[in-house]
Image (tube, grey):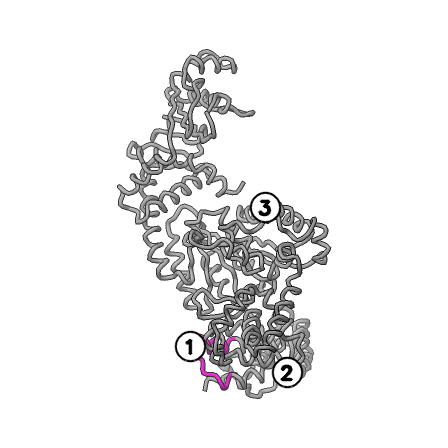
C-alpha cells in the first residue's frame, strides 16, 4: 500500500489525534502518533504514560474480537502499559457503534478471563478502560473551528489536511510532539499557506500546484475520448481514473524514494512516462504539497524559480514533491536540481525522454538519484489488456493474444492503448484521416493540409506555432472552421491560452509528418522548416532548430532564412544564437575533428585539451598548445603537431550573427 493510500486509510485516526492535540496541548503533554503501545500515546513531560488510545473506523458494530490479531491485541498491549504506569488510561475510540460486550464491564471481564488474562490484570484493565464514539463530520467541524480560532490560517481546510499529513509523517518516523513544537509548526504551516496564495498568483505559469487541478466542471466524455485517442496525458485524465494503474512501476518509484529524494523516469515518447508520474502523484503524495515545475529556457527565470521554492519550503517538517516533465533539449532543469537537491524536505520526480536522458552525462557527480527506465513488453501489455477489459466492454479484440499479434508484438504503450480501444493501428487511422482531408482539399480547395503540415512539424520538433501568424501567412479566410474540423478529428489542438496550435502527442505528430512529408515526393520538408521559423512561439526556437538540424536541415539555408526575420523578443534571438552555437560546436567536435581529438586523447590522456591548437577566449597570445608545449618532449611534440594537421581549422566567418544586424 502506498504512503498516501495508507494515509487516506488512516485519515480518521490522525483526525482524532489532531483534535486531542489541539484541545489539550496547553497541558504540556507529549503526544506520540503511532506510539509504542497504540495509535496515540500520551505522556507527561517526565515521560510517564498518561493515556494510550486505540482508534477504530470499522464498517458495522465493533466487537471484542476486532481488537485481537494473531500476534497481539489491544488488551495485551494495555496490560504491558499498566505494568509500566499503573494509572495509564486505556481508551478505545470508535467511528461506529461499539458492541455491548465491550461496553458492559462484566461481559468484558469474562471475555478477558476466557482469553487467559490473569485476575489482577483483568481487574486493572477494567478499572482503567474507557471508550468513546465519535463522528468524522463532527470531528472535522471541531478541528476546523479550533484552527480558525488560532487566526494563523488563511485556509483552515488546507491547514487541516497539511496537519494530518504532518502527523502521519511523524508517526512514520516514530517522532513525538511537544506543545512548544506544535505552536512552531502551526505557525510554519500558516505561513506556508499564506505564502502559497501569493506564490501561486506570481508563479502559476511556471510553478503549478496540483491542488488547483480539478475536473468538477469538466466533461468526462471529452477527456475519455481524448485519452483513448492518444493525446498527451494531463493530470485531469488521472483524476478521472482513465489510465491503467501500473502497480509494479509505482512500487519501483516508491522504493526509489526511500533512499533518494530525486527519481528520474526515462523512456521513449509514448511509453507513458507522464501518465505514470501523475498517477504516482495522485496516489502517493498529498495534493497540497505537490507542484509541477515548468522549467524556463530563460536562466534568470530559472533562478527566480529556485529562490521561490527555497523560500516556500523553508522550515517545513513534511516533504514537498516537485514534478518536472523535461521539455526536449532544455538543460536548465539540471540547474534547479543542483541548487535544491540538498533540501531534505524537497522531493523531485522527473520525466525525461530517452534521447535527453542519454545526453545528460555524469549527473551522479552533482547529486544522488535513482532512475527508472520505462519499457513496454508483452507481460505488461497483458496486464493492461486484462485490467482495461474489466470495465471497458467495447475492446476491439476477442482476447489479449489476438491484440498482441495485431500489434506486431512490439511498439509503444501509447500505440497499443490506441489499438485495443480503436481496433486499428494509430498510423492506419491517421493515414485514413489524411486521405479524407486530401479528397476534401481536391474537391473544395481548402487549407486543412497546409495547416496540419506546419502544426505536426512544429509539434514533432517540440514547438508550438502561432495561430495568428500561420493564419496570416497562409492567408486563410475561415481559420476557425478549419481548426475546429481538425480538432474534431483529433489531429491538433489549441494551447491553453488559445495563442498557439499544437499536436495531441509527439508520437502522433511524428506519424503525421511521415504521412504528410515522407510519403509525398513533391513536398520538401526543409521548405516548411524555413517557413516555420517566423511562425513559432519564440520560446521554442532553440528546440525547434536543434531538432531541425538533427533531421538534416542545412545551416546555410537556416542562416539565409534568419536574415529575413525580425524576432519580437530577445528570447527569440537568444534561442537562435544558442541553437547555432550548439550546432557549430557539434559539427566542429563530432563531424570535423572527432578522430583527431581521439588521437590527442590517446597521446595525452585526460589532459588532452592542453594539446589543442585553439584559442577559445582570445585573451591569450597564440593557442592552448602554445601555452603548454614546453611540458612535452620533442618526440611527443612532433606527434601532437602531426595531429594538428588533421584538425579542421578553417577560419571563414560563418554568418551566425548576421541576422542580428
Q: Is residue 201 left or right of residue 579?
A: left
Q: What is the magenta range?
A: 562-578
Position of residue 638 relative to residue 408, above or below, is: below
Instruction: Judge by depth and name the residue closer to the eye, 405 or 463.
Output: 405
Q: Position of residue 506 (x, y in %)?
A: 57, 65
Q: Position of residue 518 (x, y in %)?
A: 66, 74
The residue furthest bottom is: 652
The residues bearing labels 2 and 1 have C-alpha atoms spaced at a distance of 35 Å
Residues under numbered marks 2 and 3 in contact, where contact means CB atoms less than 8 Å apart: no
Residue linked to disc 3: 391
Which quarter of the rendered picture does the C terminus lie within? Answer: bottom left
Residues under numbered marks 2 and 1 in contact, where contact means CB atoms less than 8 Å apart: no
The residues bearing labels 2 and 3 have C-alpha atoms spaced at a distance of 63 Å
Q: Position of residue 81 (x, y in %)?
A: 43, 23
Task: Look at 46% across and 25% down and name the residue there.
Answer: 61
Residue linked to disc 2: 648
Which image quadrant for residue 135?
A: top left
The mark lying in front, picked from 1 and 3, is: 3
Task: Look at 35% across and 36% down and name the residue there.
Answer: 178
Q: Is residue 305 left or right of residue 150?
A: right
Position of residue 278 relative to residue 451, above or below, is: above
Residue linked to disc 1: 569
Earlier in the chain: of badge 1 and badge 3, it is 3
Which quarter of the rendered picture does the N terminus lie within? Answer: top right
Amino acid at each position: 500500500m502506498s504512503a498516501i493510500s495508507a494515509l487516506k486509510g488512516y485519515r480518521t485516526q490522525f483526525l482524532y489525534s489532531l483534535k486531542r492535540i489541539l484541545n489539550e496541548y496547553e497541558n504540556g503533554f507529549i503526544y506520540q502518533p503511532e506510539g509504542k503501545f497504540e495509535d496515540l500515546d500520551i505522556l507527561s513531560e517526565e515521560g510517564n504514560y498518561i493515556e494510550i488510545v486505540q482508534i477504530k473506523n470499522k464498517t458495522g458494530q465493533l466487537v471484542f474480537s476486532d481488537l485481537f490479531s494473531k500476534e497481539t491485541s489491544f488488551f495485551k498491549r494495555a496490560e504491558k502499559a499498566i505494568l509500566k504506569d499503573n494509572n495509564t488510561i486505556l481508551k478505545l475510540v470508535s467511528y461506529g457503534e461499539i458492541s455491548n460486550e465491550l461496553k458492559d464491564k462484566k461481559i468484558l471481564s469474562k471475555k478477558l478471563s476466557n482469553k487467559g488474562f490473569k485476575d489482577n490484570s483483568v481487574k486493572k484493565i477494567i478499572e482503567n478502560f474507557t471508550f468513546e464514539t465519535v463522528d468524522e463530520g463532527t470531528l472535522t467541524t471541531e478541528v476546523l473551528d479550533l484552527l480558525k480560532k488560532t487566526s494563523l490560517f488563511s485556509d483552515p481546510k488546507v491547514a487541516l489536511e497539511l496537519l494530518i499529513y504532518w502527523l502521519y509523517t511523524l508517526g512514520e518516523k516514530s517522532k513525538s510532539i511537544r506543545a512548544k513544537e506544535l505552536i512552531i509548526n502551526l505557525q510554519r504551516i500558516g505561513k506556508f499557506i499564506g505564502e502559497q496564495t501569493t506564490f501561486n498568483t506570481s508563479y502559476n505559469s511556471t510553478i503549478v500546484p496540483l491542488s488547483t487541478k480539478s475536473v468538477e466542471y469538466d466533461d468526462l466524455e471529452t477527456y475519455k475520448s481524448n485519452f483513448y485517442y492518444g493525446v498527451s496525458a494531463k493530470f485531469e485524465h488521472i483524476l478521472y481514473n482513465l489510465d491503467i494503474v501500473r502497480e509494479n512501476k509505482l512500487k519501483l518509484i516508491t522504493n526509489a524514494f526511500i533512499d533518494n529524494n530525486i527519481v528520474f523516469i526515462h523512456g521513449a515518447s509514448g511509453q507513458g512516462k507522464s501518465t505514470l508520474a501523475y498517477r504516482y502523484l495522485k496516489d502517493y503524495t498529498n495534493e497540497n504539497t505537490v507542484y509541477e515545475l515548468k522549467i524556463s529556457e530563460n536562466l534568470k527565470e530559472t533562478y527566480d524559480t529556485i529562490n521561490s521554492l527555497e523560500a516556500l519550503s523553508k522550515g517545513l517538517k513534511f516533504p514537498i514533491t516537485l514534478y518536472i516533465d523535461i521539455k526536449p533539449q532544455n538543460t536548465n532543469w539540471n540547474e534547479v536540481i543542483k541548487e535544491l537537491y540538498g533540501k531534505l524536505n524537497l522531493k523531485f520526480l522527473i520525466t525525461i525522454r530517452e534521447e535527453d536522458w542519454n545526453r545528460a552525462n555524469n549527473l551522479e557527480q552533482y547529486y544522488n538519484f535513482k532512475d527508472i527506465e520505462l519499457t513496454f513488453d508483452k507481460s505488461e501489455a497483458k496486464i493492461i489488456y486484462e485490467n482495461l477489459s474489466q470495465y471497458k466492454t467495447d475492446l476491439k479484440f476477442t482476447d489479449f493474444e489476438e491484440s498482441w499479434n495485431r500489434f506486431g508484438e512490439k511498439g509503444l504503450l501509447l500505440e497499443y492503448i490506441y489499438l485495443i480501444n480503436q481496433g486499428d493501428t494509430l498510423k492506419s487511422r491517421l493515414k485514413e484521416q489524411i486521405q479524407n482531408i486530401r479528397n476534401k482539399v481536391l474537391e473544395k480547395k481548402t487549407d486543412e493540409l497546409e495547416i496540419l503540415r506546419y502544426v505536426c512539424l512544429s509539434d514533432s520538433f517540440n514547438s508550438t506555432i502561432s495561430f495568428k501568424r500561420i493564419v496570416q501567412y497562409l492567408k486563410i479566410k475561415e481559420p476557425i472552421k478549419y481548426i475546429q474540423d481538425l480538432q474534431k478529428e483529433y489531429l491538433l489542438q489549441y494551447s491553453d491560452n488559445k495563442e498557439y496550435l499544437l499536436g495531441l502527442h509527439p508520437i502522433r505528430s511524428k506519424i503525421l509528418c511521415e504521412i504528410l512529408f515522407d510519403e509525398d515526393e513533391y513536398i520538401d520538408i526543409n521548405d516548411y522548416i524555413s517557413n516555420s521559423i517566423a511562425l513559432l512561439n519564440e520560446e521554442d526556437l532553440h528546440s525547434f532548430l536543434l531538432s531541425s538540424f538533427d533531421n538534416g536541415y542545412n545551416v546555410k539555408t537556416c542562416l539565409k532564412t534568419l536574415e529575413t526575420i525580425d524576432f519580437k523578443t530577445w528570447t527569440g534571438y537568444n534561442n537562435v544564437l544558442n541553437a547555432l552555437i550548439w550546432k557549430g560546436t557539434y559539427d566542429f567536435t563530432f563531424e570535423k575533428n572527432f578522430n583527431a581529438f581521439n588521437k590527442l586523447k590517446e597521446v595525452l590522456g585526460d589532459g588532452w585539451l592542453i594539446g589543442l591548437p585553439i584559442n577559445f577566449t582570445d585573451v591569450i597570445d597564440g593557442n592552448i598548445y602554445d601555452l603548454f608545449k614546453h611540458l612535452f618532449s620533442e618526440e611527443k611534440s612532433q606527434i601532437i603537431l602531426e595531429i594538428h594537421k588533421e584538425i579542421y581549422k578553417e577560419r571563414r566567418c560563418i554568418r551566425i550573427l548576421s541576422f542580428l544586424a
